[in-house]
Image: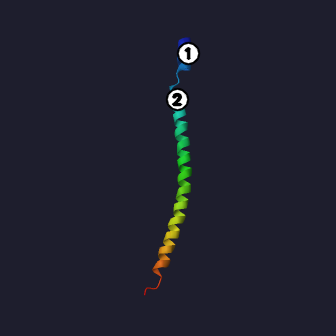
Amino acid sequence: MLKLLNKIRRNEEGATAIEYGLIAALVAIALITALGGLGGALGTKFGEIASSVDTAGDAPTS
C-alpha cells in the first residue's frame, strides 16, 4: 500500500496536463480579447469606407 501511495505521489502526468490546459485557456482568452478589439476597429473602418463609397456614388458627373 505504501508503494502505491508513493507511486501516485510521484506521478506528475496529471499536473502537466492541467498546466497545458491552463496555458491553452490563457492563450484563448488573449486571442479572443485581441480579435474582439480588432473586429471592432475593422467594423468601424469598413463603415467609413462604405459611407465614402455611398457618398461618391451620389457625386454629379460631368
Give the residue at mark 2: 16
**What crowding class fits label 2: few (fewer than 14 Cα within 10 Å), some (14-19), or many (20 or more)?**
few
Instruction: For residue 27, say whether it is visible.
Output: yes
Sequence order check: which comes first, mark 1 or mark 2? 1
Judging depth in this view, the residue of 14 and 5 nearest the camera is 14
Image disc number at residue 52: none
Q: What element carries label 1?
A: helix
Q: Residue 6 carries which label?
A: 1
Residue farthest to the left, as pictured: 62
CA gap between label 1 and label 2 equals 18 Å
User: Split into 4 quadrants, where in the image is the N terminus?
Assistant: top right
Image location (x, y in percent) of residue 37: 56, 56
Look at label 2 and name its amino acid.
Thr
Amino acid residing under circle 1: Asn
**Residue 49, percent across and down?**
49, 70
Q: In which quarter of the image is residue 41?
A: bottom right
What SS does tag 2 mark?
Answer: helix
Looking at the image, is 35 positioned above or below residue 43? above
Which residue lies at the image location 52% right of the left edge and 29% below the top edge?
A: 16
Looking at the image, which residue is at 54% across and 65% down?
44
Q: Residue furthest front?
A: 62
Placement of the C terminus among the 4 image quadrants: bottom left
14, above or below 10, in the image:
below
